[in-house]
Image: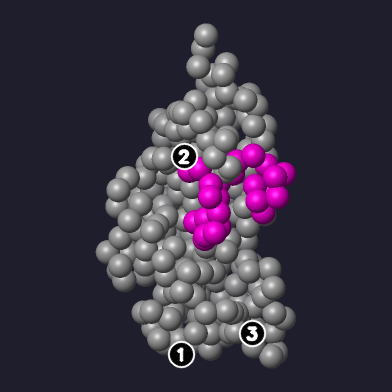
Amino acid sequence: MNATNSIPRLSVCAVSYLNTVPLVWGMLHGEQKGLFDLRFQVPAECADMVASGAADMGIIPSFELLGRDYGIVPGVGIACRGAVRSILLVSSRPANQIRTLAADASSRTSVALARIILARRYGVEPAVATRPPDLPGMLGEADSALIIGDPALHIDPETTPLHVYDLGREWTDMTGLPMVFAVWAGPREFVTPQVMAAFQDSCACGLRNLERIVAQEAAARGFEPELVRRYLASHIVFELGEPERQGMELFLRYARQLDPLRHHPGLTPASAL
């Protein structure tokens, strides 16, 4: 019997950002096509769907692993070993002077990462509020803005007059370890050896087809092909090893130690974080 025949047809939630495309390429175009019921959401919604049982597995932001006994697909995920390019803290003032932060709450991992870096590296604990990923609007209300995913890729850190902090680079400079943003995870009964192999093979298919992904996604998302190529080939790490495991463990340890969020009286509380 073909090994794929023993895989239950799971509901799988993936993320709609560019950085997830290589992970699901095999599920969309390769031998894993049709094995899973695949749907796309932003990271926080994907995590909530798995937590509620609306999806069996998902690409889970690292922060969402806290307090959950999930099975994790080893060896694949979304990480960086330096600048990530798609998680940017943009500020009207230097980081050590930031007092308020408007955050795109699409990923609670990114919000926690920003708070960890600001506290541990720059000695500040700004009040946080959630806002749509509109940089002018965010900076109209707060000292700084957290922009993630595709909206961050539309910002050129080299040309903006603002202070721009790439949180992937900030993390690796601070810790000497990679930063793991998300992994495939879900209740342990769903994360079988056959399911793990299918997810790993789907990623391998994507990495073999990066040029096809570049051509397709650049056109679909309004990016220059070279930006997509550089982002997927140089900034994002999809194959995770022991350094990534250590980096994720340290991030989760720091995340557990975060104080409750403070809210600025002039900003709507970030209750969704």
Name the residue: 62% across, 52% down.
47
* Residue designated by label 3: 263
**Amino acid under label 3?**
His
* Residue segment shown in magenta: 48-72
Image marks 3 and 2: residues in contact by CB distance under 8 Å? no
The colouring scheme, among rainbow, by chain, secondary structure or one colour, is one colour
* Residue designated by label 2: 73
| Labels 3, 2: front one | 2
Question: Label 3's element?
Answer: loop
Q: Residue furthest left?
A: 176
Q: Residues within 10 Å of mark 1 (few under 14, many from 20)?
A: some
- Give the CA separation, mark 3 to mark 2: 36 Å
The answer to whether 103 appears left or right of 166 in the picture is: right
* Residue designated by label 1: 97
Q: Earlier in the sequence, mark 3 or mark 2?
A: 2
**Taking 270 as reference, is 65 above or below it?**
above
Name the residue: 50% across, 17% down.
3
Q: Position of residue 9 (x, y in %)?
A: 65, 27
Q: Looking at the image, can residue 158 be seen?
A: no
Name the residue: 35% across, 58% down.
247
- Quadrant in the picture for residue 159: bottom left
**Amino acid under label 2?**
Val
- Give the CA separation, mark 1 to mark 3: 17 Å
- Quadrant in the picture for residue 14: top right
